Amino acid sequence: MSSKWENLQKRSYLESNARSRAIGLVDTGSFTELAGPRHRISSPHLPLLGEAVEFDDGIVTGVGLIGKKPVFVASQEGRFIGGAVGEVHGAKLVNIVRMARQSYDKMLEDNPDLPEEKRPAVVISFDTGGVRLHEANAGLLAHAELMDQFQDCKGKVPIIALIGSRVGCFGGMGFVAAATDVIIMSQFGRLGLTGPEVIEEELGKDEFDASDRGLVYRTTGGRHKYIMGDCNFLVADSIAAFRETLQEVLRKPYVEIAAMGSIGSLEKVESQLKLVELCVETAPKDSKDVWKTAGNEFPDDLVDMPLDEFLKTVKRLRDRQVPQPPSAQQLRK
Amino acid sequence: MSKQLHELTFEFKAEKPKDFSEDFLHFGVVGSGDMEVIVEHKDLDGAVRIKITSPVTGYEEVWRRVLERFVNDTGVANASFEINDNNATPVVVSLRLRQALAEIS
């Protein structure tokens, strides 16, 4: 078993399916899948529409260990209907977060002095375009329920988002990812609200050409999100790289992890508003304009630069870990 | 009603049967043009039962040929297969079923 797990580590995160990611992110042999294919809980709605079903409804949920820490994992499968959130998919996602929080409550009730290293955490590997339109009401409700669960986790269970899969993280799930405590991305990960194709359809090719992959990646991709401070970490495209940074984050005390989130305090709201102000003042035409504003003199070079060099040289508009971004005045100097 | 998912069931017996002893095996993702399969040990007097759930109609004969060949080539016996299909071509079906069995070793 161990060698199978080791092979997973080297594998590209982008190319890995949901189950490989879930198994590979936690310690070897520690992953137990809950409500998996064996239980055959597939969508009750898709058969009526003549659409193919999957035994796990496009999401792998379960629990594993990282060190001594119980880690509740949800991993979405973008290849099944674009990783879209339907009723069963959503229920599994909501309940794995609920289970983490309930475990926390029970563990702390039994032992109020439980060391942080043994307290539960939630990890979500996003690979989704948001709501599954075939069962949209249930899907939307799941988004709301998930946000509710996140709220209940505040002060207790850290929630870490991993984005490096093919579909990226779009639609309502973009909001959900933004509400987590920490976001780890690869350069192939994409994060946004309205997906590129939808923008093109609504506003025309002049506004956004979704077939221009360069444009898509420098607007929604990991490098841009890292410069913007919309993600905390940018890692290489392997399960091992994601796992390593995940371990690093989970070693920190809860308060430090929670401080990395982009919402949750007045300072953070003000920080966001300053970005809006900056956007109005500088009126960027392209992501590269924003990169320049952030202090990168040659933004074109950042596109193809090897990742380690990129991380060494890039200047970020704001570090998501620091609540206050530089003011618009400071940035213009 | 024509839009509903369709189910097909086949039963085959390999010429040189080899018992499938795994309790449970799952393989594959229901991507576009792809499929997943669950294989379980089941006492079927040396036979193999295969259930397919698919949005596609009119390919019963193709399924029968592809599956019969798979069962005879591999000799798999005493097993229940459940396939969720999403427009997989015969080549993909053959490949995925063989990959699933290769997972055991």
Image (cartoon, coloured by chain):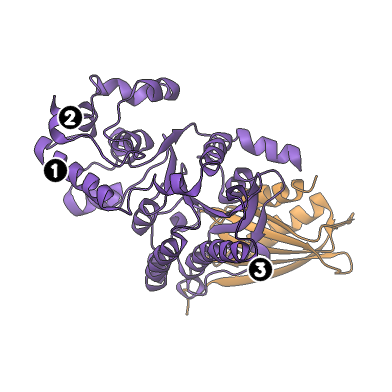
Chain colours: A purple, B orange
Specify whether A226 is left or right of A324. right
| Residue A295 image position (x, y, % from top left) | 23, 24
The CA span between labels 3 and 1 is 51 Å
For the residues labelled 1 and 2, the Cα–Cα distance comes to 12 Å
Question: Helix or strand or loop: what does disc 3 sit on?
Answer: helix
Quadrant for the C terminus of chain B, please.
top right
Residue denoted by label 3: A39
Q: Please give the chain letter of the residue carrying mark 1.
A: A
Please name the residue shown 46% across and 50% down the image. Answer: A127
Q: CA distance from mark 3 to mark 2?
A: 55 Å
Dot placed on the residue nearer the N-terminal end, 3 or 1: 3
Which one is nearer the viewer's eye here, A37 or A259?
A259
Name the residue tied to disc 1. A277
Q: Amino acid at mark 1?
A: Glu
Of residues A281 and A77, the one drawn nearer to the viewer in this rendering: A281
Q: Nearer the viewer, residue A322 or A295?
A: A322
In front: mark 3 or mark 1?
1
The chain letter under disc 3 is: A
**Can you see residue A167?**
no
Q: Give the image location of residue B43, x and y in percent.
A: 86, 69
